């Protein structure tokens, strides 16, 4: 109790010290007036009520690791075109004002951190959406959200991935930072779906990539000379620290005929889904495998045969979320599950689609049957509907059991590597951390095959009630706070550095200075590009170095290992 009190006091004191800046800072009048001339008075404000509403939220992890570090922006401005964005960025450069782009604002890096003088550029008015049906290319603006994009594609019998973040998140922000879905198995990773882009550089110039450099339609992602896409998009990306992507063209893919008619939306929020009852050309099937080894070998072989539209293994407790009536029901059911049950539960979830014909799907199902015979896979009863991946409707259900969670690893590598990484994390969590978090009982996380098994994705999550790890909540628990940070920042970094599962949670999860040396020192390139394109560090500071700043502002004694490493690297 005493230790708890001292730590709690220390954290609170530290939080007040971190607010070393005044909370409110007014923008120079000249800057405001110049921006107002660009967008018109309706689309700009410096009113405190609006500014407070744009003060950092984020979800789960950010709620606890960034508390006390968020500030209201000094101006909020909503441009409607690329030219307006470029003009605003130039004004920020003229007045030496830091700025940041926001799309849907799911991520804390879409809000000002560490300083009160930032201009927030909200992109939600950038609403262009058009489709070239014949060449299967969509062109869209930065404000377009997945819900609209996926519905739009389906109206042309095309489809595209949707993310676990839900239909409200924006397609461009997601594609340049992450872009992961089980549907990447057939549609490929984000760097291959993204074609041409239009970019406002950190200094306010407009540049293009792909076939847009030639004044052509955005049908091609490449072109003569160096390709900007590689500089702007990576598995561990800029999070607003390298200017603003205002338009993009994306590859979209053939889907079912009359997709919007045969996939029927049903249910009442939060229990909504797309029903497959009117079509026999799409099916999710769950297969129970006898042991972990056969499940792993089975997904490798299935990926080689290139059948199916998705192959994924989900955390076992997700199944309990799916069947639970409410939070209490979840905990009742989940507490009856023990480690042995998890060790004996090996479920692969796979999607089949008859894109071209029913016959094509039947052929794939026959191949699947042969593979399942070989590995002892048994088909289980599976709901004929989709909640998550075609038009994501269940993102918020993920918070049901604990009201908050953090994704601590989003790793991309080979299937073999993600199996190993998941096992190590599952084992470490159950041995040393489980008493502080939702017990996962040794489960190996969520993984999926990407690009027909040429790569794979692993996500490992940590669940806890936000009230326990929020230092200003009356229920704050310093042990949970510290253990959560240690797990996310140090333990997961150490494991992924060792196994090679490159973590894409860059600018707010893992310190670049800590993991960079294991990844060809990519932080050196981050600095070189920053110095060249954003020498005054105005584009969303401190991204992509948020974790470094956040770790340094923690109370003394927390995360000592990573902290001393970062200090040495900075002196460097
Ligand atoms: C519960 C949950 C589950 C998720 N699951 C997945 C998943 O399965 N797969 C996946 O891929 N993602 C997932 N995400 C991430 C999610 O889809 C993000 O919301 C998305 O990637 C970012 O889009 P956004 O519109 O929220 O961007 P924002 O939060 O607005 O911005 C994200 C970052 O990009 C910058 N930015 C925004 N727009 C631009 C732009 N136009 N140009 C340059 N920089 C920009 C911002 O400054 C910020 O740093 C998940 C998120 C949550 C909360």
Image (cartoon, rainbow, N blue to C red):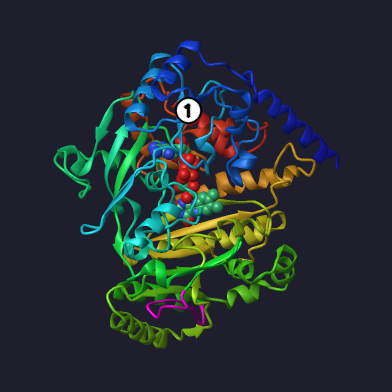
Q: How many marks?
A: 1
Using the image, determine if residue 364 lies above or below residue 452. below
Quarter placement of the C terminus: top left
Q: Nearer the viewer, residue 262 or 141?
A: 262
Q: In the drawing, does residue 410 fall left or right of residue 53?
A: left
Q: Nearer the viewer, residue 56 or 44?
A: 44
Q: Quadrant of residue 91?
A: top left
Q: Is residue 223 visible?
A: yes
Residue visible at 71% across and 72% down in the picture: 333
For the N terminus, give its image quadrant. top right
Residue 412 image point, x, y percent? 41, 55
**Residue 229 within the segment the image draws in magenta:** no
> Where does residue 437 sit, x and y in percent of width and height?
68, 55
Residue at left offset 63%, top offset 70%:
320
Looking at the picture, how far across and down is residue 506, in whole percent?
A: 46, 42
Q: Residues within 10 Å of mark 1 (few under 14, many from 20)?
A: some
Asked if ligand 1 lies within 8 A of label 1, the reply is no
Q: Which residues are magenta?
A: 276-291
Q: Residue furthest right?
A: 1
- The residue pinned by badge 1 equals 43
């Amino acid at each position: 109790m005493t230790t708890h009190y001292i730590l709690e006091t220390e954290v609170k004191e530290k939080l007040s010290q971190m607010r070393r800046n005044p909370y409110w800072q007014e923008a120079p009048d000249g800057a405001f007036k110049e921006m107002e001339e660009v967008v018109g008075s309706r689309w700009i404000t410096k009113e405190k009520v609006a500014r407070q509403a744009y003060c950092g939220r984020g979800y789960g992890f950010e709620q606890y690791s960034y508390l006390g570090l968020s500030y209201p922006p000094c101006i909020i401005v909503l441009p409607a075109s690329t030219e307006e964005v470029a003009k605003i960025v130039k004004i920020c450069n003229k007045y030496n004002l830091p700025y940041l782009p926001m799309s849907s604002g799911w991520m804390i890096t879409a809000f000002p951190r560490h300083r009160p003088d930032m201009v927030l550029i909200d992109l939600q008015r950038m609403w262009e959406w058009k489709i070239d049906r014949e060449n299967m290319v969509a062109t869209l603006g930065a404000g377009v959200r997945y819900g609209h994009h996926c519905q739009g594609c389906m109206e042309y019998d095309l489809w595209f991935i949707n993310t676990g973040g839900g239909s409200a998140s924006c397609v461009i922000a997601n594609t340049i930072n992450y872009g992961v879905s089980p549907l990447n198995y057939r549609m490929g990773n984000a760097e291959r779906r993204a074609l041409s882009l239009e970019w406002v550089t950190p200094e306010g110039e407009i540049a293009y990539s792909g076939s847009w450099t030639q004044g052509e339609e955005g049908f091609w992602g490449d072109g003569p000379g160096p390709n900007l896409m590689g500089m702007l998009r990576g598995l561990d990306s800029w999070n607003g620290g390298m200017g603003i992507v205002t338009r993009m063209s994306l590859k979209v893919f053939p889907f079912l005929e009359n997709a919007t008619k045969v996939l029927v939306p049903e249910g009442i929020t939060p229990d909504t889904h797309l029903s497959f009852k009117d079509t026999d050309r799409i099916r999710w099937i769950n297969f129970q495998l006898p042991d972990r080894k056969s499940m792993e070998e089975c997904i490798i072989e299935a990926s080689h045969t290139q059948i199916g539209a998705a192959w994924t293994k989900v955390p076992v407790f997700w199944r309990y979320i799916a069947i639970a009536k409410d939070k209490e029901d979840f905990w009742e059911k989940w507490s009856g599950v023990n480690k042995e049950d998890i060790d004996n539960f090996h479920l692969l979830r796979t999607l089949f689609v008859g894109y071209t014909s029913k016959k094509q799907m039947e052929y794939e199902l026959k191949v699947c049957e042969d593979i399942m015979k070989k590995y002892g896979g048994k088909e289980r009863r599976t709901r004929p509907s989709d909640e998550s991946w075609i038009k994501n409707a269940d993102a918020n259900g993920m918070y049901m059991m604990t009201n908050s969670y953090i994704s601590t690893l989003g790793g991309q590598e080979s299937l073999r590597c993600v199996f190993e990484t998941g096992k190590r994390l599952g084992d470490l969590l159950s041995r040393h951390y489980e008493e502080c978090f939702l017990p996962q009982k040794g489960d190996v996380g969520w993984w999926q095959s990407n690009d027909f098994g040429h790569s794979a994705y692993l996500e490992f999550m940590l669940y806890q009630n936000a009230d326990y790890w929020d230092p200003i909540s009356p229920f704050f628990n310093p042990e949970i706070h510290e253990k959560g940070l240690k797990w996310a920042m140090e333990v997961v970094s150490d494991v992924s550095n060792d196994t090679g599962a490159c973590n894409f949670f860059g600018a707010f999860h893992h310190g670049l200075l800590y993991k960079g040396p294991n990844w060809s020192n990519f932080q050196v390139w981050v600095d070189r590009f920053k110095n060249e394109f954003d020498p005054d560090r105005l584009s969303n500071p401190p991204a992509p170095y948020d974790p470094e700043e956040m770790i340094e502002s923690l109370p003394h004694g927390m995360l000592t290992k990573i902290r001393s490493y970062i200090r040495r690297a900075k002196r460097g």
